[in-house]
Amino acid sequence: MAVWNIDMAGAASTLKAAASHVEASQPSLEGMGKALEQAAASIPGDAAVVLNALNDVVVLGLTPSAGEVAGRSETILTSTAKALAFYQQGDLAMASAAQRNAALAETAAPAPVHGGPAQALKE
């Protein structure tokens, strides 16, 4: 049976740091797009092949890839946060169930038989 012992504070801290890194990457991605647009604007009009290639890099490569990275990162962070919340809720639910069962066991304990288990077996 697997044993889980997750440090919730450490996990939350790691998620927060990862989210800030993902968020911090957005301006860089936008900056790359703007830089490529500026590069395209500086290319002479008679260099259509170069402009088309640069457009393909932005439209077919950079934009979809950046969007996919951002989307996947958000999904990973959100799913991990949900899993940790479920773990914590489950942990609390198990602790409550254990306390209830312990209280039930105390109230439902059979009366002791005089003479111990051996005597009870003889009777």
Image (cartoon, rainbow, N blue to C red):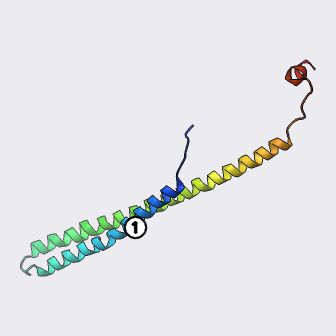
| Residue displayed at 90% across by 23% down | 120
> Considering depth in this image, is 83 or 120 the residue closer to the camera?
120
| Residue displayed at 62% across by 52% down | 90
Q: Amino acid at mark 1?
A: Ser
| Residue displayed at 11% across by 80% down | 42
Q: State whether residue 8 is above or below residue 108.
A: below
What is the x, y in percent for residue 41?
15, 81
What is the x, y in percent for residue 26?
33, 71
Q: State whether residue 24 is above or below residue 96.
A: below
Q: State whether residue 79 is above or below residue 50.
A: above
Find disc 1 in the rendering and name its residue: 20
What is the x, y in percent for residue 74?
42, 64
Which quarter of the rendering shows the C terminus? Answer: top right
The image quarter in which residue 32 lies: bottom left
Left or right: residue 106 compared with residue 123: left
What is the x, y in percent for residue 14?
44, 58
Q: Residues within 10 Å of mark 1 (few under 14, many from 20)?
A: few
Instruction: Answer whether residue 81 is visible to the viewer in this image.
Output: yes
Q: Specify the farthest residue to the left.
A: 46
Which quarter of the rendering shows the N terminus? Answer: top right
Left or right: residue 30 compared with residue 104: left
| Residue displayed at 7% across by 80% down | 44
The image quarter in which residue 39 lies: bottom left
Left or right: residue 114 compared with residue 14: right
> Considering depth in this image, is 88 or 29 the residue closer to the camera?
88
Left or right: residue 105 compared with residue 67: right
